[in-house]
Image (cartoon, rainbow, N blue to C red):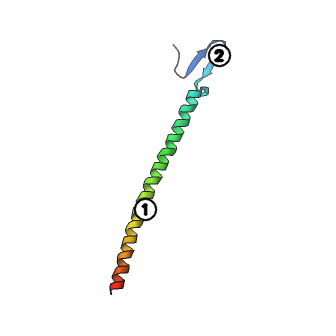
Amino acid sequence: MMRNSIAKTGNKGWKNHEDDPMEQMRRSLLAKEDIIQGLRRQIKEEVKEKYSLYNRIIELNTQIEKLKSE
């Protein structure tokens, strides 16, 4: 029975699955998925910060209007 991680290749001996181009592509895609998830988290935090700043602008504008009317 052949193991999943290695395959026998004729006279060449054992073929390491990590040298396979498909395995390298799979690893590359997994690494890119990690990068994408990190960017999504960063965007989420930046959106929260943006709306927090919008609320602060509203508060400051309200204070300005209040001071002008006094």
Determine whether, in the image, residue 68 is placed left or right of residue 36: left
In this picture, is 44 found above or below 52?
Answer: above
Q: Amino acid at mark 2?
A: Gly
Q: Secondary structure at mark 1?
A: helix
In this picture, is 38 found above or below 9?
Answer: below
Front residue of 30/54: it is 54
Residue 13's disc number: 2
Q: Would you identify the image quadrant in which residue 10 lies?
A: top right
Q: Using a 10 Å C-alpha cutoff, classify the residue at mark 2 as few (fewer than 14 neighbours), some (14 to 19) or many (20 or more).
A: few
Q: Would you identify the image quadrant in which residue 58 lies?
A: bottom left
Mark 1 to mark 2: distance in Å? 59 Å
Residue extending farthest to the right is 12
Q: Position of residue 70 (x, y in %)?
A: 33, 87
Q: Amino acid at mark 1?
A: Lys
Q: Position of residue 15 (x, y in %)?
A: 61, 20
| Residue position for label 1 | 50
Determine whether, in the image, residue 58 is placed left or right of residue 43: left
Q: Position of residue 45 (x, y in %)?
A: 44, 56
Question: What residue is rendered at 35% in x and 76% in y?
Answer: 62
Question: What residue is rendered at 39% in x and 70% in y?
Answer: 56
Question: What residue is rendered at 58% in x and 31% in y?
Answer: 24
Front residue of 7/44: it is 44
1 or 2: mark nearer the eye? 1
Give the mark, 1 or 2, whose residue is nearer the N terminus. Answer: 2
Front residue of 69/20: it is 69
Q: Position of residue 66 (x, y in %)?
A: 33, 81
